[in-house]
Amino acid sequence: MSSPPAELAQLTAIHTLGPTGTNCEAAARHYASSRGLSVEIVLHRTLEEGMARVLDDPRSALLGCVVYPDLHGLVFPYLDRMVLADQFLFDTFPMLLAAREPGVRPTRVASHPAPRALVPAGVEVVLATSNAAAARSCAAGEVDGCITTRPAAEANGLAILVDHGPVPMGFTIHAHRALARRAA
């Protein structure tokens, strides 16, 4: 177990992308556990919504993913209040092409923007706010396939069509400058 940077030892919450079943949730739980942090993991529909909550709570941080399409939008607008305080590598859950029906090639696939390159060529992409939200959309019949994680596919009773396996991924921790100053 490695220790977090000193300022992060004071955290009470890590906000990240939800709903349950996202790679960000798994990474947040791993980060807290591997660093001996006793924090609440708070899930949001988007990382932008999570950042809005973090800005109001100086003892919380945001966990982002380096392939999040607008990660720059979570850094540069907040340079006066937030710092990129830590980063780490963590394998994602196996990334899947899943569907409601086994063996049927989907024609409309829900995907978060980051892994949409995993959607087969010639298939319509419907953007979702997370991999777990894509699975829920598929299960609800809004689309007939999705790019998602294994836990989200299983939770929604989806059939696995293609297993792309886990992806080594970078994750970022964004914390308040004020918290960093108190620790110095």
Image: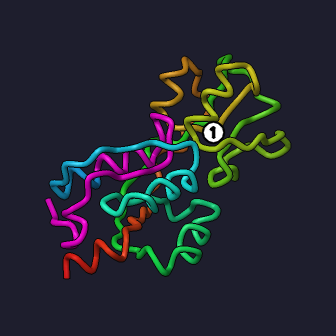
What's the magenta region?
1-30
| Residue 107: quadrant of the picture | top right
Tell me if 47 is positioned left or right of 102 in this view: left
| Residue 120: quadrant of the picture | top right
Tell me if 169 is positioned left or right of 30 in this view: right
11 in magenta: yes
Look at the numbered disc 1 and give the secondary structure of its residue.
Answer: strand
Point 58% across, 59% down: residue:
68
Instruction: Give the mark count.
Output: 1
Question: Where 181 sits versus 39, above or below?
Answer: below
Point 64% across, 61% down: residue:
69
Of residue 127 and residue 58, the one placed in the foreground of this image is 58
Farthest front residue in view: 56
Point 80% across, 46% down: residue:
121
Q: Residues within 10 Å of mark 1 (few under 14, many from 20)?
A: many
Residue 155: image location, x then y, percent: 48, 22
Residue 101: image location, x then y, percent: 68, 16
Point 64% across, 20% down: residue:
139
Question: Where 17 sits versus 159, above or below?
Answer: below
46 in magenta: no
Q: Quadrant of the C terminus?
A: bottom left
User: Dot 1 corresponds to which residue?
Assistant: 147
Amino acid residing under circle 1? Ile
Residue 108: image location, x then y, percent: 80, 33
Of residue 64 and residue 23, the one placed in the foreground of this image is 64
